[in-house]
Amino acid sequence: MTDTQKPKLRSRAWFDNPDNIDMTSLYLERYLNFGLSLEELRSGKPIIGIAQSGSDLSPCNRHHLVLAERIREGIREAGGIAIEFPVHPIQETGKRPTAGLDRNLSYLGLVEALYGYPIDGVVLTTGCDKTTPAMLMAAATVNIPAIALSVGPMLNGWHKGERTGSGTIVWKGRQMMAAGELDDEGFIKLVASSAPSTGYCNTMGTATTMNSLAEALGMMLPGSAAIPAPYRDRQECAYHTGKRIVEMVHEDLKPSDIMTLESFRNAIVVNSAIGGSTNAPIHLAAIARHIGVDLPLKDWQTHGHHVPLLVNLQPAGEFLGEDYYRAGGVPAVVAQLIAQGLIQEGAMTVNGKTIGDNCRDATIEDDRVIKRFDDPMVKDAGFLVLSGNLFDAAIMKTSVISPEFRQRYLSDPDDPEAFEGPAVVFDGPEDYHHRIDDPALNITPRTLLFMRGAGPIGYPGSAEVVNMRPPKYLITEGISALPCIGDGRQSGTSGSPSILNASPEAAAMGGLALIQTGDRVRIDLRKGTVNLLLPEEEIAARRADLEAKGGYPYPASQTPWQEMQRNLVGQMNTGAILEGAEKYQRIAQT
Ligand code: FES
Ligand code: MG
């Protein structure tokens, strides 16, 4: 590309603007004081932001502080200038009341940084669950050239010769404690074993899911999502990512060229094949809305449900992050799907090539970890989208329904995909923790557990609490899971077969607000319905009664942001974004 063909850099408006020389001098003056020279700033070199998500508060992403050095070297090598800046931290397990609250806050902060400062292109340092969608959402809104770099998963965890996976081992340990098989110290030791190095969760939780999907969307260098954090290859990838973003700026390759309807559909298909998190539909909907792509929740069932599970990672399977990378990572999975015509091969990616060209010839290096298409872990592994008088939309990951669970709950000879039972209702996670082992609730193997008050408004940001364990007395009888339904989310590291992300939530006066303990509910997976078995008049009377009392009650906000988010946030089926923010899409072009 000759110099005259290169797109004009937006940073020139700050540093090289002959029409506004006094402002230019002001802008230039303060950027000099950390070591950049006048010559560099006025050289016409692209200014590349490194959106730094790593910090001591964000241990999952902390290794980006190291990787940023290699990103910088790549940027400089390719003729760019690196400017690193912090993004609002999000740590999935440490943030109260829930990390879900901070995705939209981090998004807002990054939009302001990318729009308001002299940045021509940006490296998004992704990792822990919500950091990836938050940054992709911001890149979608501002629409300047952007490339994501995953921090990568931790090394595999081991305990007594067995792999221990992030999160998954916590759910298992809690059950073992409840059954009296583990004491406090043993529990802590077991959990600690799952975190042997720097990096994010090594299971197929939301972090591995969202980074795999960022690659499937085309926003990350091919083959890079799965590289474990401490590996040499991760450093090399950081360098190449830095080099590549400079070229992307010269090519003017923007998020809107990459994140198209085709690439979102590809991401849905890949999510089924990897056994991705139930948080993915929320985050993908959010990214899609900010880039202006229409991606209704129903698309998950239409394009994803029939796709088999190919990746044998915990919680659905056996292996962990290192195994996933060695077996071939995302390209090996995509190659299997391409061979079946399930991928739109023409979708563009950050390296300037299509996903078809990047992945078509990728091979599986270990078919215990990445299964071949004709020998999958599970058939029809995607989500079902359910509706009924309790909610307009909710999802269920049917691939985690164990044969034992299916036998116990879905074996009605007249209707093998249906289940009916009495409800026990909890109002938020605290209520559940206080009462779950109370014998007065009379929870039996036929009970359906309900969690409400856990959606984007009720528990601001939405809590990952729908996967509820049965009471201890049932666990000791060998009942390890009950059907759970709720307006909250569920950790991607949990293998619980729940119906979740129910929208609208109880706090928005969805049907869940009206259910009472003891009501009977029918789930019909074949019809895709979940219904409260009560006459319509009774439901209407309960609604009128609750509305007269001021609606479904939820705790007061504790911080200004909680209140602001509650006032602006939408429901999970449409991405739980700040409603109205989507109209600022592509602001850098306007
Ligand atoms: Fe951060 Fe799992 S808690 S990646
Ligand atoms: Mg999570």
Image (cartoon, rainbow, N blue to C red):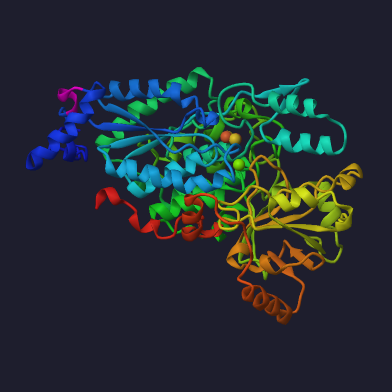
The foreground one among 90 and 495 is 90
Quadrant location of residue 573? Answer: bottom right
Q: Is residue 404 visible?
A: yes
Please tell me which residue lies in front, 521 or 436.
Answer: 436
Identity of the residue furthest to the top in this view: 232
Of 498 and 505, the residue lying toward us: 505
- Tell me, yes or no, if residue 343 can be seen here: no
Q: Residue at x 72, y 69 (%)?
A: 531
Q: With 27 as the anchor, is 58 left or right in this view?
A: right
- Magenta stretch containing residue 558, yes or no? no
Q: Is residue 203 left or right of residue 483?
A: left
Decide if residue 303 is on the left or right side of residue 175: left
Please state the horizontal and vertical placement of residue 73, each as a whole percent of the image. 34, 20
Measured as percent of width and height from the top left, residue 500 is found at 66, 55
- The one nearer the camera, 328 or 566, is 566
| Magenta span contains residue 40 | yes
Residue range of the region highlighted in magenta in the rendering: 37-41
